[in-house]
Amino acid sequence: MKLVLLGPPGAGKGTLAALLHKSLKVLHISTGDILREEIKNNTPIGIEAKSYIDKGALVPDELVIKLIENRLTSNKEFSNGYLLDGFPRTRKQAENLDEILKKIGQPFDCAVYMDSSLPLIIKRLSGRRVCRNCGATYHITNRPSKKDGICDQCSGELYQRPDDNEETIRNRMDVYLQSTRPIVDYYKAQGKLMQVDGNKESEELHDLLLKTFDAERKSYKY
Ligand code: AMP
């Protein structure tokens, strides 16, 4: 299965992607995770990206397109497909992605669009905690870890992403509406869009998607 996950910050793309990665055994590519790794390693890309991410702005197209192109062209683990999470985020990225996927002969099957309401987004993101070590995500009330501040999976330290404060969340939402939301219509026009309710819990969406993919197995190659 080859999928693109679209939706506002806090729609639950990362959590759904982790579930789909496990069940479909597809390659999970998250530009947010790649950029945070670059920041952690203090690379020139990371240093440049940090100034944008901390403000809730988008990292320049040229930089993220290059990162994605490198990942997609250097990776040969496409036997079960892939899952793009957080990319594309602009029309230019979407157009470049079409070209890259055409070049490597791996066009995606479907763009899953998770829509979500602003109050829920703020609640989800401001209470989100992430493991510094393995990247697993929790929520202080909806999905708390067993031990306060400690990851259930690897005992790593949980932290709050610096861009998960209310002011930055509102900036990210404005940027989303202006730059990313138009991609929904771009994919709708291509007949590749599947809209799901991002207000639902990720587990429920995951089960629903698997059932839908199964019913449409004949038209999707996986
Ligand atoms: P995420 O983890 O997907 O919420 O991404 C965190 C931040 O990384 C975003 O708010 C952007 O600043 C940056 N980022 C991630 N993916 C992209 C992208 N495709 N284009 C531009 N910036 C991105």
Image: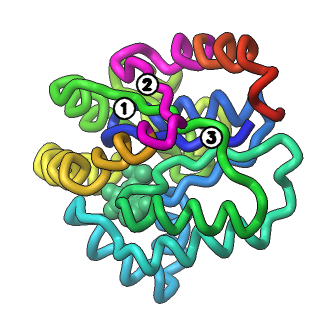
In this rendered view, identify the residue nearer to me: 136 or 205.
Answer: 205
Gap in angstroms between the C-alphas marked 1 and 2: 12 Å
Residue at left 15%, top 50%? 174
Q: Mark 2 points at which residue?
A: 195
* Picture quadrant of residue 221: top right
Q: Residues within 10 Å of mark 1 (few under 14, many from 20)?
A: many
**Could you tell me the amino acid type at mark 2?**
Gln
Q: Can residue 150 be seen in this view?
A: no
- Disc 2, SS: strand
Q: Residue at x 64, y 14 (%)?
A: 212
The label on residue 65 is none
What residue would you read off at disc 3? 3
Q: In which quarter of the image is ligand 1?
A: bottom left
Return the residue at label 1: 11
Element on which disc 3 rests: strand
Q: Give the range drawn in magenta.
A: 188-207
The amino acid on which the numbered mark 1 sits, given as a three-letter code, is Ala
Q: Does 75 sit above or below residue 14? A: below
Q: In what quadrant of the picture does the N terminus appear? A: top right
**Residue 25 picture quarter:** top right
Q: Position of residue 127 (x, y in %)?
A: 29, 32
Q: Nearer the viewer, residue 207 or 135?
A: 207
Q: Where is residue 222 in the image (x, y as percent from the top left)?
A: 83, 33
Label 3 crowd (10 A; few <14 / some 14-19 / many >=20) = many
Residue found 33% across the figure and 28% down from its top: 115
The amino acid sitting under disc 3 is Leu
Q: Position of residue 38 (x, y in %)?
A: 52, 74
